[in-house]
Image: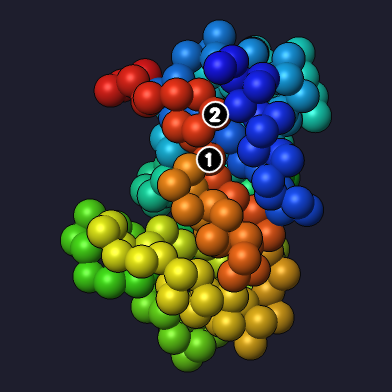
Amino acid sequence: MTIASNLAEIRARIGKAKLIAVSKFHPEEAVREALDGGQRVFGENYVKEAQEKFRDLRAEYPDIELHLIGHLQKNKAKAAVEIFDVIQTLDSRELAKELAKALQETGKRPSFYIEVKFGDEPKKTGIAPTVTEIGSLLAYSRDVCGLNVVGLMCIPPEGENPQSYFKKLKELADILSLSHISMGMSGDYEKAIERGATEVRIGTAIFGPRPSHF
């Protein structure tokens, strides 16, 4: 199977949901194959890797849409704002403050999603899955910091049935009137779409096994 054929197969299954091709640790050559297959929306976990991989590619393909889907450290807020069109991992007021500064310094206007954390896995980040907590960060980010927050994202706990978490994220998004719901990966994206995902983040099913580093 080629990257192009993998993309075609996934597109046939996801309906109207947006496909974010997760290119973390995959080389520029693999991204080019995806671009040749018509893919323009990509997800990266690390700011530095995205800078190195997509700087030239974005010059060649100005319609690329780049999403940050990994945890964002506050000291990299400006660099993230400069390269990403969407930052999906807003998870604190402190980060919102830094992003607001970055918007002023760069003049860029990316969109933002609030990352919601289900379970207590210490390596995962995100805000508690309650209307109160998310609503508070949403209001602060929009009204005080001027961030264009439009959605929610999550990664369900490993080893658990993800459907209840997908259902909960959709409920939270509906209550808060957020139209973008980013959930579902290579192993569960069809279940996520059934539960209301508007976009899915797929890496392995497109690019094959992920290298250990970039």
Depth check, front residue: 180 or 80: 180
The N terminus: image quadrant: top right
Can see residue 117? yes
Amino acid type indicated by mark 2: Ile
Quarter of the rendering containing residue 36:
top right
Measured along the vertical axis of the image, is residue 85 above or below residue 161? above
Measured along the vertical axis of the image, is residue 135 above or below residue 70? below
Name the element at disc 2. Answer: helix
Quarter of the rendering containing residue 9:
top right
Image mark count: 2
Image x and y of residue 189, in percent: 54, 52
Measured along the vertical axis of the image, is residue 180 above or below residue 1? below
Name the element at disc 1. Answer: strand
Identity of the residue drawn at 43% across and 38% down: 45
Image x and y of residue 176, in percent: 64, 83
Image x and y of residue 96, in percent: 50, 63
Question: What residue is disc 2 on?
Answer: 206
Side (left or right) of 120 relative to 174: left
Picture colour scheme: rainbow
CB under 8 Å between discs 2 and 1 = yes
Instruction: For marks 2 and 1, give the CA distance.
Output: 7 Å
Amino acid type indicated by mark 1: Ile
Measured along the vertical axis of the image, is residue 152 above or below residue 62? below
Identity of the residue drawn at 50% across and 24% down: 207
- Give the residue furthest to the left: 122
Identity of the residue drawn at 33% across and 20% down: 211
